[in-house]
Image: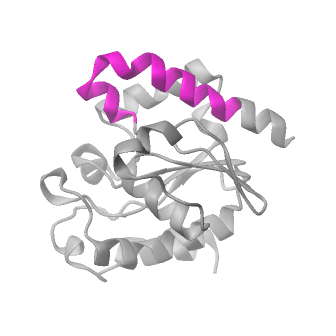
């Protein structure tokens, strides 16, 4: 399977109830040879409408975080754990994650990045489970953000979702520091 055939399958997917309320099932985007893959939770309203990743308010924050980290958005590949917008920005349900994660697993195989950066709780939880990394209790989850975990030939750098800054401006400096870790890890991987 190629990335193009995978993306066609994602666009046509009707495996769960989310296909009934979405406008676009969002495929990953970016450099298919990227060394870094960002994995967000799910598209938001703007992304669902336009069919592009990180174009809303959290996209502006992400662009700034990447710029401050010295990473060009064109150098990476970004995707979502769940490919369709979640109604009323609710959390994804287990069966939705199970249906969609097959697409994510295939993207990881096809892109084969050196660094995976899951953004936010559900993406981090899925990637940690997939690579058999022990998860901290939810109350201590914030402590793993910006840390580097090794799993086989992959480095995993869990990060807060850029939207965290929209809800709490005081988090911005912490996110800048944590996103800079991506550049350090990419430099070490060379």
Q: Please say if 118 is above or below 15.
A: above
Residue 136 location (% of width, % of height): 46, 52
Q: Please say if 147 is above or below 124.
A: above
Numbered label tally: 0
In the image, farthest residue toward the right: 190
Residue beneath the point at 62% across and 26% down: 180
Q: Is residue 8 visible?
A: no
Residue beneath the point at 53% across and 45% down: 158
Residue beneath the point at 45% across and 78% down: 9
Q: Please say if 91 is above or below 50.
A: below
Magenta residues span 162-183
Residue 153 location (% of width, % of height): 78, 60
Q: As drawn, is 124 to the left or to the right of 46? A: right
**On the image, which quarter does residue 164 sit in?**
top left
**Quadrant position of the C terminus in the picture:** top right
Q: As drawn, is 105 to the left or to the right of 138? A: right
Residue 109 location (% of width, % of height): 67, 70
Residue beneath the point at 61% across and 23% down: 69
Type of secondary structure dominating the magenta stretch:
helix
Q: Does the magenta segment cover residue 177?
A: yes
Q: Please say if 19 is above or below 45.
A: below
């Amino acid at each position: 399977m190629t990335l193009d055939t995978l993306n066609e399958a994602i666009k046509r997917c009707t495996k769960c109830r989310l296909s009934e309320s979405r406008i676009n099932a969002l495929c990953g985007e970016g450099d298919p040879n990227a060394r870094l893959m960002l994995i967000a939770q799910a598209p938001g309203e703007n992304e669902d409408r336009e069919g592009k990743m990180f174009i809303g308010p959290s996209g502006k924050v992400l662009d700034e975080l990447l710029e401050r980290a010295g990473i060009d958005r064109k150098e990476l590949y970004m995707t979502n754990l769940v490919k369709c917008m979640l109604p009323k920005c609710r959390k994804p349900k287990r069966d939705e994650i199970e249906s969609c994660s097959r697409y994510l697993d295939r993207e990881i195989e096809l892109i084969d990045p050196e660094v995976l950066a899951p953004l936010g709780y559900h993406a981090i939880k899925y990637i940690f489970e997939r690579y058999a990394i022990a998860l901290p209790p939810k109350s201590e989850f914030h402590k793993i953000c910006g840390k580097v975990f090794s799993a086989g030939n992959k480095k995993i750098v869990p990060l807060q979702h850029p939207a965290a800054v929209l809800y709490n401006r005081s988090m911005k400096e912490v996110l800048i520091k944590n996103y800079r870790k991506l550049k350090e890890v990419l430099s070490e991987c060379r």
